Structure formats: C-alpha cells, structure tokens
Amino acid sequence: MKKYFTSTLVLFVVCSAFSYSPGTSGFQFLKMQVGARAAGMGGAFIAVPGDVNSLFYNPAGISVLSKKSASFSYHDDVLDINSGFMGYVHPKVGPGNIGVSVLYRDYGSFTRTDSDGLEQGTFGSTYFSLVGSYGLQLRQNVLVGGSLKYAQGMIDNYSSSAIAADAGIMYTIPTQHLILAAGVYNAGATLSAFVDQKDPLPMQMRVGLSKRLAHLPLLLGFNIYKYNDEPWYFAIGGEFTITPNIFLRWGYDSFGRDLDVDSSKDTLAGAAVGFGFLWKNITFDYSYSSLGALGSLNRFTLSGRF
C-alpha cells in the first residue's frame, strides 16, 4: 500500500508543479459530475468500485465488474444547457476489463450579431469526449486503471481539440470495509485552438475514501480534489440501502461556495439528494443538485448488467 500511494503522491507533486493560473483552462465540461448515483452523493465517488460511472471517476473501479455493464445518463442543466454520458464495460479482456465512454455537453443556441449589433441568426456550441479505459486487479487488494481520451469543442464554425489521460488506484481494506483511492485526470495537451491560443486542460488531482458501516446499511464517501485553475475543494456523500432494491442518497460538494451571489438560496448551493431503484438487472437513478440562486441540475441514469 505504501509503495502505490507514494507513487501517486509523486504524480500529484509533478502535476502541481505544472499548474496554471486561476481561470485559464479550457474544456470546462470535463469538470462536470456524471451519473445520478455519483451526483446524488455529491460527487464523492472516487473510491466506489463496481459502477459503470467509474469510467469517469476512477477507471480502477471497473476492474471488479464481472458482467457486461452499460449506463446512460441525461443531465438537465440551467438555461438551455444539457449533457449526457454513455458508458460500457466489457469484462475479462486479458487480465482486466475494458471500457468505452462518451461525454457531451450542449450549450444551446446563441444569437449571432454583426459589428453594429444587428441580429444575423443563431449559432451553437457543443463539447464532447471519447474515452477508452482499462482496469485490472494488480494485487489482492489493489485495483488500478487508466484512460485515454480525445476531447473536442465546437463554437459556431470554430473548433478545438485535445488529448489526455487519466490514472487511478484503489486500495481495499476488507476487514475495515474501507477503500482508499487516488487519481490524476485530464493530463494532456491541446492539439488545436479555436483561433490562435491553445487553452490548457483542466487537470485534476483527487484523493478519497469510502467506508461501508458494519452495523448500518450506509455507504459513506469523502473526496478532496483540485483543478490546476481552482483552489482545493471537498465532497462528501452517502448512500443508504432501504431495501436491496431501493437506495437513498445525499451529498455536498464545496464547489457550491463559489456560486454565492448573496442570495438566501445560496445556503443550499452544492447540496444534492437522490434515489435509486433496482429491478432485476436494471437500475434507475435520479439526483437533484442545487446551484443556489443560479438554479438546479436534474440527472437521470439508466444502467444494466447482462
């Protein structure tokens, strides 16, 4: 355990040394949360294995899936923004499991104007990423995984593209029902710019843990994380198993404190709740995330194993 987490710590130091100034990174859609289950837990999901959405949060987590697994999520955002995530994991490809995923974000329609302010129709803006992942059990209690991703953004007739990699690790302590995890995400470079300035990627460092309580059907998660253009944040959440088929979730992401606009509604910014329902091999999940006075996000996820 010490050897693996020391290596990850070295990665953190190296990544921090090449950090950028606040507010300078592009491809901001890579910062979003995906999946209603994870979002309902405030995004505190880096140390929760066995979920297709581990493709996004920690590719090491897909290594414990024993069946073909797929998931589709839709995110109803503020204004005209909407997003989606699709993932698939195929088990037993070599020593581990392989996965693919697609993340997209549509920013809606904007009014085009000329230099005199006269309307000239509309234009749109969309971003997407294509990701290939692989996870395996390296040792009895050690899970590792990595991803390669291609991202592209389009604004009107302009586009920008990038390539990046993710790497994650999980260490399980079965006697304590505890999992420790760490990961580095979006480490890469921009290939082409919208015009002439290449925006850096929002590289992220995240560490966390999850613990399943021994005498209560409750799974707890806690993460701390940092992007190269943001301060440190934390996320905390839980999943309560009402019955083997019904789950209730809650969470809080401290990123919500940056959404403060001096409104009484800002108290809830960053808070999330959700639920899940399992029927045979199909799971339906829903989550509600508050953005304070700015609005809220509704996420819907349908997952299956076969």
Image (cartoon, rainbow, N blue to C red):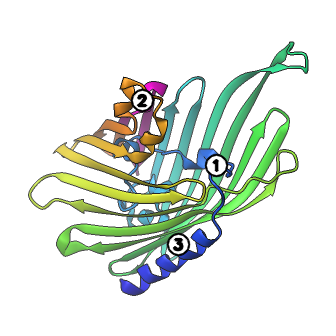
Residue at the farthest left position: 215
Which is in the foreground here, disc 1 or disc 3?
Answer: 1
Name the kind of residue labelled 2 in the image.
Gly
Q: In the rendered image, is residue 59 in sight? A: yes
Task: Please give the residue where the numbered disc 3 appears in the rendered image.
Answer: 12
Q: In the rendered image, is residue 91 in sight? A: no
The residue at the point 51 percent across, 55 percent down is 231
Name the kind of residue labelled 1 in the image.
Gly
Residue at the farthest top position: 118
Most foreground residue, 58 or 96: 58
Most foreground residue, 189 or 133: 189
User: Is residue 264 on the magenta stretch?
Assistant: no
Most foreground residue, 229 or 277: 229
The residue at the point 11 percent across, 53 percent down is 216
| Label 3 or label 2, whichever comes before in sequence order | 3
Q: CB atoms at circles 3 and 2 under 8 Å apart? A: no
Taking the image as shown, residue 285 lies to the left or right of residue 259, namely left
Which region is colored magenta? 285-306
Local packing at callout 2 (Cα closer than 10 Å; few below 14, some 14-19, many 20+) is many
Taking the image as shown, residue 188 lies to the left or right of residue 173, namely right
Task: Please give the residue where the numbered disc 2 appears in the rendered image.
Answer: 292
In the rendered image, residue 255, in percent from the top left (x then y), is placed at 45, 45
Task: Please give the residue where the numbered disc 1 appears in the rendered image.
Answer: 23
Q: CB atoms at circles 2 and 1 under 8 Å apart? A: no
In the rendered image, residue 33, in percent from the top left (x then y), is placed at 48, 45
